[in-house]
Image (cartoon, rainbow, N blue to C red):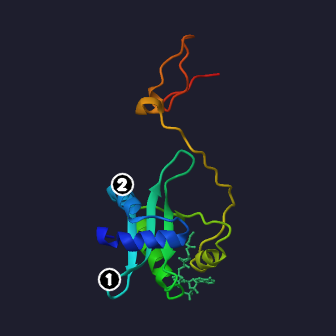
Amino acid sequence: METKDLTAVAALATQLGYPSTLDQLKRRWERVRSEPDRAVFVAERAAGAVIGWVDVHGVHGLSADPYAGIGGLVVDDAWRGHGVGRVLMAAAEQWAREQGYPEMRLRSNVTRHAAHAFYARLGYQVTKQSLAFCKTLTPAAGGEPASEASPDESGTAPPTANTTSPP
Ligand SMILES: CC(C)(COP(=O)(O)OP(=O)(O)OC[C@H]1O[C@@H](n2cnc3c(N)ncnc32)[C@H](O)[C@@H]1OP(=O)(O)O)[C@@H](O)C(=O)NCCC(=O)NCCS
């Protein structure tokens, strides 16, 4: 993917259900392109117009061995049903294999029935259903990260991002 593709990528993100402006995409792309364990693939028509994209990345945590995850997938609604999504997922899976990931995981809104049929056709199986939670956070005072919290007057340190105290 290249910077010139961002207008089309923003329009496709909007089709995916996440209304996005070109300015937003420029900021997101600056961050995304700098992440080494991440790739974005686009599908183009012969003339070079972008008609789909997929965002894939490595997922690392304490609860599971590393795996690859899909951050987003969309094909222009005028081009669906022509094999574009399959090609994009093949590119994402190939990238994941080359990085050494043994598994691809993804989440899909329960309302996206067409996408569910697509993923099933590509060999994906539903493993569980979850609820998505979100909370708006007020900015940290002074912009300092939470891990900078210092001990209180009792001498016990509050839990921080780096340490935890026994009960
Ligand atoms: C889901 C999506 C990416 C699929 O892309 P696509 O280019 O239309 O899919 P393809 O044409 O590559 O289809 C691949 C296979 O899936 C099957 N398939 C695709 N859509 C299907 C549907 N609605 N029902 C049944 N099968 C379907 C195709 O028949 C094809 O099978 P085949 O190759 O054996 O013939 C596309 O429909 C899309 O962008 N949807 C809106 C955004 C979205 O829901 N994204 C996923 C968010 S989790």
Q: Secondary structure at mark 1?
A: loop
Residue 142 in which image quadrant = top left
User: Does label 2 or label 1 sit earlier along the sequence?
Assistant: 2
User: Which residue does the image show at 66% across and 75% down from the upper left?
Assistant: 113
Residue 99, visible in the rendered structure: no
Q: Is residue 133 left or right of residue 29?
A: right
Q: Quadrant of ligand 1?
A: bottom right
The residue that disc 1 covers is 48
Residue 64 lies, with reference to residue 162, above or below; the image says below
The residue that disc 2 covers is 31
| Image quadrant containing the C terminus | top right
User: Which residue does the image show at 66% across and 67% down from the upper left?
Assistant: 126
Crowd rating for badge 2 (residues with CA inside 10 Å; few <14, some 14–19, many 20+)? few
Badge 1 amino acid: Gly
User: Which residue does the image show at 68% across and 61% down from the upper left?
Assistant: 128
User: Which residue does the image show at 56% across and 64% down from the upper left?
Assistant: 106
